[in-house]
Image: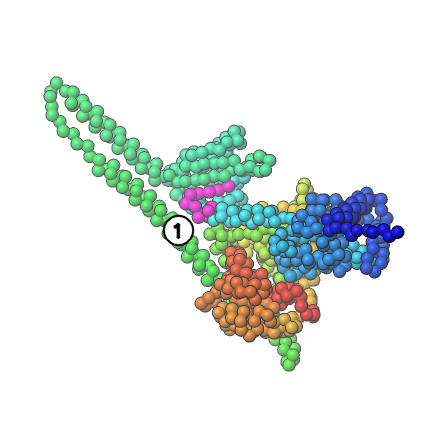
Amino acid sequence: MTTMTSNPSPEERLRAENAALRARLEEAEETLRAIRGGEVDAIVVETDQGPQIFSLDAAQAASNRFRGEILAQVSDAVIAVDADQRVTYLNAAAERRYRVSASDVLGRQLSEMYTRRWPRAETEAAMWAALREQGEWRGEIIHHTHDGREIAVEKSITALRDAFGAPAGYVAAVRDITERKHSAAELQRVSTLLDTLLHTAPVGFCFLDRNLRFVRINERLAEINGIPAEAHLGRHVSETLPALFETLREVTGRILATGQAVLDHEFSGETPAAPGVARFWKESWYPVRDGAGEVLGFGGIVEEITARKQAEARMVTMNAQLIVASVRQHELAESAERLSVELQTDITARKEMEEALRASEAQERASRLAADQANRAKDIFLATLSHELRTPLNSILGWAVLLRTTPPADRKPVHADMDHGLAVIERNARVQGKLIEDVLDVARITSGKFMLDLRPLDLTSLVFAAVDAVRPAAEGKGLKLEASAGGGGEGGDGLGSPWVNGDSSRLQQAVSNLLTNAIKFTPSGGRVAVRVELLKGTDAGTARITVTDTGRGIDAEFLPSVFERFKQAGEGTTRSYGGLGLGLSVVRHIVEAHAGTVRAMSQGDGKGATFTLELPATPQTAAPPRSDKPISTVNLPRLDGVRVLVVDDEEDARLMAKQTLEAAGATVVLAASAEEGYHLAINGKGGAAELQVVVSDIGMAGEDGYSMMRRVRTEKGGKDLPAVAVTAFAAPEDKRRALVAGFQTHMAKPIDPHELIAVVAGLVGGKGRTTK
């Protein structure tokens, strides 16, 4: 007898597959719970090469604990892959996030779920290096999903190894931070808008802390007070406006007692802008609170009403005169004398006063308009000044470095005397560049346009970079330059590098200014030392940088004014040591803008000086590798086979960039205008299919670099072409404009050729070999 068996229907097969998949997932989740609970010593996994044993012994305990914690966070997507990037596991959150099912993607390439877009080329290289060396990596990237969506994610990856220690794959916990990124971008946009409103408003604004010290102030209020804006910051009200201190203390005391704002309060008094003249203001003061409702300080809105009060006083006087005349008229009308009296009131003076008030208001509006126009003209002038001063320095510094470090193959190495001369040119070009930056920074500070780009920073790496930058100047003067990090000082805990929330370029500028100052005033054979350390304390503690020298020292009578602008110790200091007396004032502004302090100590008489800079520390957020070697000893990458388009309307700048990049092995295509650069990048010789990176100037005649890059980005072939803006426009807003236009990196002239090589290599993923 033959038994007939019917084939299962598609629905039955699907139900069977789903049941099997659920069983596998339940088994996997049970296994993960057992791993996390320490109940499993090893796992046997079936692979194409047969069963593989993954050990979970004590040697991998830390890694396993980390892995277990990640897998337990079921609200995040958890994805595991093998060494060939094939998906071996994903949890339910990953299925929802990427809109896939486990049955469809298990055993398939991860790239079929999503592809990655890195913020910088070097970020991907850093990830693989961290996974190789530490077995873990954390960071933020963009995922492009298989269905066309773009997700910003925060990702933690752990490397897996088999029982023999060989790489076996990776497990990742992925958190969607798209909304957080959008919120952060919107917050930054609102913050920028508020800053713009603050500095352009026709009324005065300020923020005082609880101790009545100025934290922020706009130019209008500084103008009302008759004191520069930067002279308010960090100063107590009693120091800047002593005549108004008692009244303001009463108002803020009322706010602290009641928790309520004080609105439309009228002040009167004198200011340094007009000593001996009574002035009037209408002010509103608000409590500024933290997230817990604690009052951090006081926000003030100030409008000067002196002209109005004077007009009102004149009106009161005239009205009184009118009342007296009216009473007199009434008395005459009631007399038994039957007098016929025609009384005319002269209101000419009142009309003149009303007209004068209207003229005063019109004059005030015209003055504000003129001030706005003057500020815009000053901004244009500063940008032009920066461009005109930096452009020639770019060629001077660039060629000096190139001639010293990369002699042509068909010539003998540079003679020692010639090398010394080139070193002098290089050193003085850097000094000139620093003076230019100090002058421009002072202009930005006084105009309220000194902006910071805050982010977590490894302070030790930043200090060592500043030391490398000034090392040629120290060696050229025959000084011993030392740098150290860690505990050991008073309060130091020796627990590693302190982290701060700050602007990397500005803080490095502050440290460089302190080091340059020490080098300038230390005679040949002396010593300059810098130390960075983390002090014990509550929360994250305090980060301290100390710069000491064995130079001439600072006289006691000059110490209180050492950080003031244009101040130098003694009439002959400028002639003997050079400089404009701006560097230390810029240091103080940068540090105080970071909520820090800087102070100077010296016994004078050739006993040297010590400058101490302290900043609020923050918890460490990452631990990237850091090299303590000076720049001159760091290997430079080769650019063999890399094709670069250089766009610049200055012939000297084009040739300098060409020589720099060709010395590293690159093939360079030149364009003398933005229009030519656009066509070469898209249509002409060396088009986007061949080019790997564009290096372009911004301030070119005719079309500028911003416009050119925006046009390139609209073309299909230029959408993903890496680009570097190399420009003499060096303000923070210039950097933002470059990034918005489509450049990946902004470099301010004068450019160090080695830095240009490193940046280009980073954008093309370090293509080529490295060489000394």
Question: Which image quadrant for residue 743?
Answer: bottom right
Which residue lies under the disc numbered 1?
Answer: 371
Which region shows up in magenta? 197-207
Report x, y in % for residue 292.
60, 35
Residue nearest the viewer, comparing 36 with 703: 36
- Image point (52%, 49%), residue name: 189
Question: Which image quadrant for residue 274?
Answer: top left
Inspect the magenta stretch and tell me whether residue 198 lies in it.
yes
Tell me the crowding category of disc 1: few under 14, some 14 to 19, or many 20 or more residues within 10 angstroms, Cα based: some
- Image point (66%, 72%), residue name: 640
Is 40 placed above or below 744 here?
above
The quadrant in which the C terminus is found is bottom right
Is 601 placed above or below 357 here?
below
- Image point (53%, 29%), residue name: 257
Q: Is residue 24 left or right of residue 628?
A: right
Q: Is residue 56 left or right of residue 388?
A: right
Report x, y in % for residue 559.
56, 50
- Image point (68%, 70%), residue name: 768
